[in-house]
Amino acid sequence: MIDMRGLLSFHLLWLLRGGEKCGYEILDELEKRRGERPSPGTVYPALGRLVKSGLVNKRREGKRVIYSITDSGRREFKKAVAYFQKIYGEVLREGEEARDMDDLGIGYI
């Protein structure tokens, strides 16, 4: 099972399930979603752990390192999504309800 502490591994697999990416593309995608650029000193070791565990492949293209999700990574990602939904589903649903109530001008306590 993927270590869910901090959710970085989960997020990396989520990004890679859409296609292979180099490290800079991964950093760019994370920055778009977080609003700030994550430290390469955090992201690259996490990618290394995913490679070591067989969930992600890496290969060199000149100076670039390209990362891609493996079949095992896809299976583990699906398990992680189910786990995430089980643990956080209610929180996310309540968040959606709160936004819907705000949109209607009802407010949420």
Image: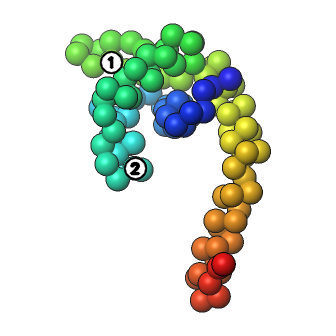
The image quadrant where one finds the C terminus is bottom right
**Secondary structure state at the residue bearing disc 2:** helix
In the image, farthest residue toward the front: 109
In the image, farthest residue toward the left: 63
Q: Is residue 26 above or below residue 88?
A: above
Q: Residue at x 51, y 19 (%)?
A: 50
For disc 2, the neighbor class at 10 Å (few under 14, some 14 to 19, many from 20) is: few
Amino acid under disc 2: Arg
Give the left or right position of residue 15, taking residue 30 as reference: right
Q: Residue at x 57, y 12 (%)?
A: 54
Q: Which residue is mark 2?
A: 34
Label 1 and label 2: CA atoms lie apart by 23 Å
Q: Quadrant of residue 26?
A: top left
Depth check: 45 or 63 in front? 45
Give the left or right position of residue 84, taking residue 43 as reference: right
Q: Residue at x 72, y 31 (%)?
A: 79
Give x and y (percent) for residue 70: 57, 19
The image quadrant where one finds the N terminus is top right
Give x and y (percent) for residue 20: 44, 27
Q: Could you tell me if residue 104 is visible in this image? A: no
Give x and y (percent) for residue 49: 49, 16
Q: Is residue 4 above or below residue 104?
A: above
User: Residue 3 shows which numbered tag?
Assistant: none
Q: Residue at x 60, y 33 (%)?
A: 4
User: Residue 65 shows which numbered tag?
Assistant: 1
Depth check: 65 or 3 in front? 3
Q: Name the front one of labels 1 and 2.
A: 2
Q: Quadrant of residue 71?
A: top right
Q: Quadrant of residue 61?
A: top left
